[in-house]
Image (cartoon, rainbow, N blue to C red):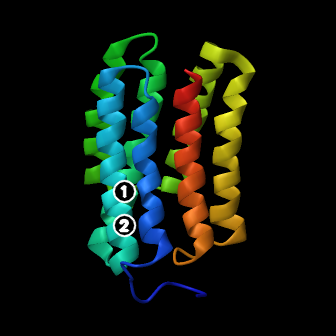
Amino acid sequence: MNGSPTKGDWTDDVVYSNLGYLLPALFAPETLGAALVGMAGMLLCVGSAAYHATYARWAQRLDVAGMLTFVPAVVATIAAQWSPWVYVGVPLVSIFYWAYTWQINSFFHVPAWVLLGTILLALRIGWWALLPAGLFVLAGIVRVWIEPDSDSWWHSIWHLLGAGAAVAALVLL
């Protein structure tokens, strides 16, 4: 499908590929990180699945705000290796992103969070941090340049690469 999607479909692969966002929580190094990444992953999974199933504006908000909650939760889990107090920031950032979803440019905020997470991961484990960063960059290439349409199997690949980047980051901790 070219251009903007016009209808949703609960049986579409872009709905079910969101299940990948549940996996990173299994690899968080401690219980609180697993809980936060798990809840954020569940929000993103449900929000993105609802969006792709309906292509309704309310569901798109759940999708975007879910993504803007998930990435900081993963970054907080990386940063918590120095202090668990960073977890306090996840609900605060989440509230901000949910309140201002449409005023936020997710194409800037998500990569900024990933850059911070990559730097923190590199401080912790060295050059291995480039592995999840590379998966994220590959996901970005798929999303922006190969197939920007949100109703294609390439979009499913984007979901799986993004979830895979989070899994890789947490496994490496």
Q: Position of residue 48 (x, y in %)?
A: 38, 63
Q: Marks 1 and 2: in contact by CB < 8 Å?
A: yes
Q: Position of residue 34 (x, y in %)?
A: 35, 30
Which one is in front, 125 or 12? 12
Q: Position of residue 2 (x, y in %)?
A: 61, 87
Q: Using the numbered discs, state the Cα–Cα distance from disc 2 to disc 1 in whole angstroms.
A: 6 Å
Residue corresponding to mark 1: 45
Circle 2 packing at 10 Å, graded few (<14), some (14-19), many (20+), is many
Position of 8 with respect to 43 (left or right) is: right
Position of 80 with respect to 87 (left or right) is: right
Residue at the spot 38% in from the left edge and 83% down from the top edge:
8
The image quarter in which residue 154 lies: bottom right
Circle 1 packing at 10 Å, graded few (<14), some (14-19), many (20+), is many
Residue type at tag 2 = Ala
Residue corresponding to mark 2: 49
Q: Where 64 falls versus 148 (above or below)?
A: above
Which one is in front, 70 or 104? 70
